[in-house]
Amino acid sequence: MDMHRLTRELNVKNENKIVMLVADGIGGLPIEAAGPTELEAARTPNLDAMVARGTCGLSIPVKPGISPGSGPGHMGLFGYDPLEYLIGRGALEATGIGFHLGANDVAIRCNFCTLDASGNITDRRAGRIPTEESAPLAVRLRDISIPGIEVFVEPVKEHRFVVVLRGEGLGGDVADTDPQATGVPLLAPVPHNSESQRTAEVAAEFARQGAELLTDQKAANAFSMRGFSARPALPSFEEVYGLRAAAVAVYPMYKGLAKLVGMEVVGDAKTLGEQMEIVKDQWENYDFFFVHFKYTDSTGEDGDFAGKVKRIEEFDAAIPAITDLNPAVTIVTGDHSTPSLLKAHSWHPVPTLIAAASCRPDRCTTFGEADCVSGGLGQFEAKYLMPLALAHADRLGKYGA
Amino acid sequence: MDMHRLTRELNVKNENKIVMLVADGIGGLPIEAAGPTELEAARTPNLDAMVARGTCGLSIPVKPGISPGSGPGHMGLFGYDPLEYLIGRGALEATGIGFHLGANDVAIRCNFCTLDASGNITDRRAGRIPTEESAPLAVRLRDISIPGIEVFVEPVKEHRFVVVLRGEGLGGDVADTDPQATGVPLLAPVPHNSESQRTAEVAAEFARQGAELLTDQKAANAFSMRGFSARPALPSFEEVYGLRAAAVAVYPMYKGLAKLVGMEVVGDAKTLGEQMEIVKDQWENYDFFFVHFKYTDSTGEDGDFAGKVKRIEEFDAAIPAITDLNPAVTIVTGDHSTPSLLKAHSWHPVPTLIAAASCRPDRCTTFGEADCVSGGLGQFEAKYLMPLALAHADRLGKYGA
């Protein structure tokens, strides 16, 4: 059941503004028995005040037990079923470095690798060549010329770079050329369907010319191509919710994900304070604001419990800048949990609150995992958050008479 | 959405062991106003200790309001959507008596019945003929011979027996021959599709020869055939979860259900103590152990509240034998509730706990129905228990990048 069938039909326009504050990876775990989680350890007076007048719950990013990457995590928050709307690995990598994919694009994740004299792979990552050496090599590959095709090559980090092929009739379903082994040659790009025949041919020609351009190299004398993917076909926020949506993010990945669902990326903030300024400046121009805060995730990934607590407190301190704008609906959530204990994204449900005039009160008093268990939103799949947001903003009409 | 699509793709192997302890029908109801349930009345210090370090919740066996039989109840626990993976009545009956169905088998539940001189049914259960009389008659039917078909006839209890037809090209979709009425003749076996044409013909021949073999009988001079079913097509635990799974059960039904999903039945325990010994002995040979305890269900079915309390305490006393093995993940649950008050399987959600190092604590302190309502797992469909188990065992990779 696609909720968009309902939101397309039922959404109505008004002046009510919705702000979705995403503290990436905010959910956590205790690091000692009977201890608090990061969120429970943090002093969060502003979030707690919102809890008092809002409704809390726990958001399941995909399905119980499933730990999502940033792509599916945000698709869920944006109300796009993460099991239905898949973003290919190449498309996600391109998105992550700020490359905005067009309708005629196929994105490919590439790894520099080392081949021996007989053409067999000796190192699948070219000795993890440092970025300062690999980036100029990636740029060198921009000299590749293929008739009818526009070629983009973007350095990423160490042995990784992204290639985007732009042209008519390029399907996105081509097998990886990385054999996932050494002592064997690279594979030829094999199309999975007839629509991707041309893509495979172009990729083979790209690889051929690329190898020529790299003949003088010892380590990075070739590259594998993986995760071929076209731009995912996602209907826009305007289409499915009737919302003019703005994204206020610092990192390219989250700007890119927002663009994929038709949000406009506004401003060029470097800090949470600047993000809040941008929301204020743009307040009259949009119905919906997605504000992304990265550091609750990165501290979790680092296993830095105390650092994550501090970042949560920094996030809390920014809340009044939003409440001062008096949005009709404020949502605070995360795209997944990132417990410092696990140093990774996890499947644990994410503390979530909705504050709005039409919230039904619950008995939660603080914003924390154990409190949210008994919140009025219960445990719900993240994809239902947008319909709930629209409802609390009085932007969804009645279903049926 | 089939969760197996995700678990097939994301499962990873490691040394972490998972134990699923199923106390059949463990959920219950109070027998007096404001009284405790059976589980709440029982002294369960070992389960309560696991609650303190684990996460609790309530498992909905199929869907809210649906009381499952043992088949769908266990399919849910094993992570096979019980609405998608159907086990035919004949296949379940054969499984229940320990008959392991092969790929070319069709199983049929048969009832001895009584026909009058004109061939009309006078008693659909042959006067509930006692087992000691009916079993030899069922064995007599093994003399039936049909070219190209291997015939198995297994006594069950009173008027019931099971027939398995083994041969090429036998579909499982044939209508019951029981007209569910007296004063009318048995129906002919009618195929529902062309694949089951031959099955219907073989069944008709089986019924014809069977009636001849029973002409000397007064009560059981014929039989109806119901619940025709082929072996259900279930992918194995190894395929969908990457788990080498062992089943440690006392009763044939549960061994059979476990075999249907590719578990290996280990040992031949007669008591819970012996089951625990087998788990210990086999500890290094499997990744997953399914341990089934029957008597919490049978006492519930008998309406024996005090007896069920006692059985729960017996179950609790066995817990240390598992915790001593230090499994990465321990699950305690049931396939459904069997309240003594109702003397039957019920739809009430089932108290469930997961204990693992990556559990998020909740505020539950004892293992009981009312406590589990506020558990961190919330209320969830049983089919999500296996993905949660894999996640807590660090056996599921990230979904998407």
Image: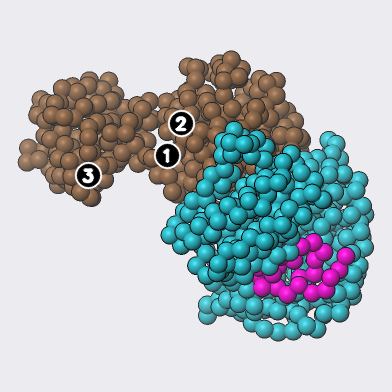
Chain colours: A cyan, B brown
Are the residues flagged by discs 1 and 3 from a single subunit?
Answer: yes
Looking at marks 1 and 3 on the same chain, the residue that comes earlier in the sequence is marked by 3
Query: In front here: B68 or A400?
Result: A400
Amino acid type shown at disc 2: Gly
Identify which residue is drawn at 72% across, 32% down.
B50
Give the secondary structure at mark 2: loop
Query: Is residue B261 at least partly visible in the picture?
Result: yes
Question: Where's residue A40, x and y in %?
Answer: 86, 50
Residue matched to label 3:
B196
Residue A237, image quadrant: bottom right
Does residue B362 appear anywhere in the picture?
no
Q: Residue at x 37, y 36 (%)?
A: B92
- Counting residues from the start of the chain, the first of labels 2 and 3 encountered is 3
Task: Read off the residue under disc 2.
Answer: B262
First in sequence: mark 1 or mark 2? Answer: 1
Q: Is residue B225 above or below residue A307?
A: above
Q: Judge if badges 1 and 2 mark residues of a common chain.
A: yes
Residue at screen point 22% across, 45% down: B195
Q: Name the residue under label 1.
A: B234
In contact (CB < 8 Å): disc 1 and disc 2:
yes
Residue A92: mark in rendering: none
Query: B309 or A77: which is nearer to us?
Result: A77
Q: Quadrant of residue A252?
A: bottom right
Tell me, yes or no, whether the highlighted magenta stretch contains residue B77: no
Q: Please give the chain letter of the residue carrying mark 2.
A: B
